[in-house]
Amino acid sequence: MPASVKRIVTLAPNLTETVYALGLGDKLAGDTDVCDTPAAAKQKPHVGNPQNPSLEAIALLHPDLVLATTSINRLETAVALERLGIPVYTSDPHTVRDMLDSIARMSELMGAGEQGTAVVAQLRARLDSLHARLEDRPMVHVLFVVWEQPLITIGQNTFIADALRWAGAESVVLSDRNWPQLSLEEVVRLQPDYLVFAGDHSDGGATELADLRARPVWRDLDAVTTGHVVDVSEEALRPSPGLVDAIEQLAHTLHPEAFAKENEIRNSKNEIQLASGGPSENRTECSPCAR
């Protein structure tokens, strides 16, 4: 490792997002074809796909440090880069706390220890607040759908399973495999309280629900007939700071009663704002008139 890291290459979307969350976007020399968060990441030079990046493209960017993850990248890539004299830091978070520890470690390696401490402290505070609200409430049993055809869900030892627990939920599937495949018949037998999908829909799951109600077997699930279908942010699929946003989003959906007072205050503020004509900066002063 050089004394000062000035150029970084990331080999996975969650790592790119973490670099930006630490305020180090100017140090990012390159990323992969699928790095899309934040939007600025799309403008960086790309080194190929995460599983088979171009070693030549990486070397031409002259990075002081390459960030990788065992969940997507291959060991051969890290070994080849090290043989070229390029330091590689590889993360492998299996829990939300692991993710926070990894962010702190990466921030130190990139010379941004203070930023890392601040970011991690803020994320921990938000998680602690959720825990305080949900610790006495029963867990909601969910099926987290990673892929539909074939139907793939999550195992017990993945960071997503741990994220669900922070949101007051647990998977109905018990498996030591990270990404177990199951049949629709098995889902019918398990009858989860909620179906959780990760996508870009802004309607909270209405589009997904309408689609499932038109499909055989799916439409007969209790969760579908009761409308218990949730579409959370794709951040739920990435062990990066945005994962906490997805956890909060899911917690609000599955346990609305835990946030009733907070929502009531927010609604009251909106009503007052509307009654007064909206925010003051959007109103114009009344001119003198004949009356």
Image: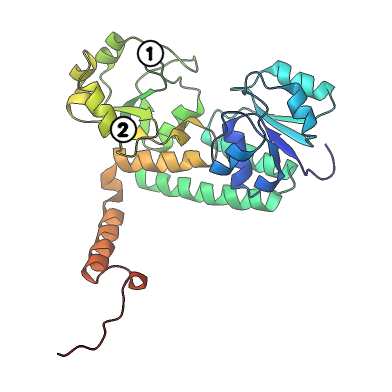
Q: Nearer the viewer, residue 251 or 229?
A: 229
Q: Is residue 22 visible?
A: yes
User: Cα distance, mark 2 to mark 1?
Assistant: 18 Å
Helix, strand or loop status at disc 1: loop
Instruction: Provide residue 224's location: percent of width, then percent of height.
Output: 22, 25
Tell me which residue sits at (27%, 62%) in the image: 270
To which quarter of the image does residue 52 belong?
top right
Q: Residue furthest left?
A: 291
Left or right for 119, reference 60: left
* Total number of numbered discs in the rendering: 2
Q: Is residue 38 visible?
A: no
Q: In this view, does 268 lie above or below 67?
A: below
Left or right for 88, reference 170: right
Quick one: quadrant of the C terminus? bottom left
Quick one: quadrant of the N terminus? top right
Tell me which residue sits at (30%, 80%) in the image: 285
To which quarter of the image does residue 90 belong?
top right
Count residues near mark 2 (Cα–Cα under 10 Å), then give few for <14, some for 14-19, many for 20+. many
Kind of residue indicated by mark 1: Gln
Q: Nearer the viewer, residue 124 or 183?
A: 183
Instruction: Provide residue 74's location: percent of width, then percent of height.
Output: 66, 18
Kind of residue indicated by mark 2: Val
Instruction: Provide residue 244's location: percent of width, then percent of height.
Output: 47, 42
Instruction: Provide residue 23's location: percent of width, then percent of height.
Output: 63, 50
Count residues near mark 1 (Cα–Cα under 10 Å), then give few for <14, some for 14-19, many for 20+. few
Q: Which residue is label 1 attached to? A: 149
Left or right for 249, reference 98: left
Q: Which residue is label 2 attached to? A: 230
Q: Which residue lies furthest to the front in this view?
A: 290
Helix, strand or loop status at disc 2: strand
Whichever of labels 2 and 1 marks the residue nearer the N terminus, that label is 1
